[in-house]
Image (tube, rainbow, N blue to C red):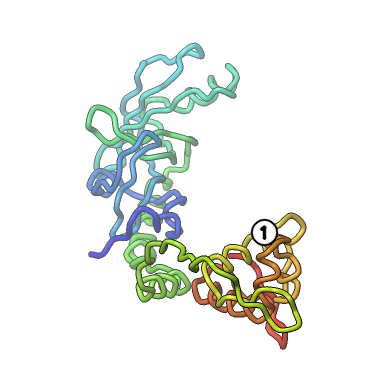
Amino acid sequence: MQRDEPKFWPLDPLYDTPVVLLAQHLNALPQAELARSGEVCWLYNHPIRYVKVGGLVIGVDPKHPHASDTRVSVTLDDGTGLIECVHWKGESDTDDAWRHTISIYKHARYVQVHGKLGRFRQARQLVVQHAWAIDDPQAESLHWLEAATLWNECYQDKFRRPGLVQKLEQQQQQQPPPQPPQPPSYAPAGPRPVVAGAGSPSAPPASEELQALVLQAMRAPGAERRALSASEIHKELPRGPAKLAFKLADVKDALRALDEASRVYVAQEGRDPLYRCV
């Protein structure tokens, strides 16, 4: 089964969604990644971090939790296996709020929780974020039904990356690898050719130097937030020999080269297109 790299995991809707599971499924999930922030597991080809489970409370540590305790460890039994949970007192929890929370975990009471996957002493553990007691005698059966329905109708469907992401990947694979920058070539010493009647040096062909000047002009204060035409960019070139050396046609050639290299893009088509930096 093909599984995505970690950089694509947030694209899966189940990555940030509490997945409804039974204990036997939860404890059998293969691990994808273990980090300080928690554990990521594979559900088919879905990377998941959060789960929702339910079961009867069969163990509480400490047995008689107090408001001064910073955590409560709970063992739930849903009929298919055991689920080890830990509920930590939050920094913003008042003593009254924490007393209400720990009062939920009474022996033989049916409780549902959802939280984040984690590990403790090489065993899977659920770090509880929310918990609530349910007195309905059908609650366990309804949880089983919800888990089975989602398993068959949702979780078994393979995750596929969005079409736009696949298209961008194909374009990146088709692009040739970037070439190392070439050292600038210098013309031999001597008088530079002068255009008759103009008194200015002739324009060299579009080069990396000109492309760098074009990008510098497009990123100048006051220009970086709007689309610019070739003539506007030519006017924004730094004053000095460079502006005299390059003509408007050279700037257009440089913009076409930068567009092909995906360093600028055409923001508005037309007779005189407008460009913006990527």
List x then y, in percent, for residue 156.
32, 65
> Which amino acid type is shown beneath numbered disc 1?
Arg
Q: Quadrant of residue 87?
A: top left
For the point 53% across and 76% down, the residue is 257
The one of 117 and 172 positioned closer to us in this rendering: 172
Q: Is residue 213 left or right of residue 181?
A: right
Which quadrant: the C terminus? bottom right
List x then y, in percent, for residue 66.
47, 13
The one of 118 and 36 positioned closer to us in this rendering: 36
For the point 34% across and 58% down, the residue is 46
List x then y, in percent, for residue 256.
57, 79
For the point 41% across and 45% down, the residue is 50
List x then y, in percent, for residue 120.
28, 29
The one of 220 and 45 positioned closer to us in this rendering: 220
Location of mark 1 (residue): 219
Relative to 109, say whether 22 is above or below: below
- Disc count in the image? 1
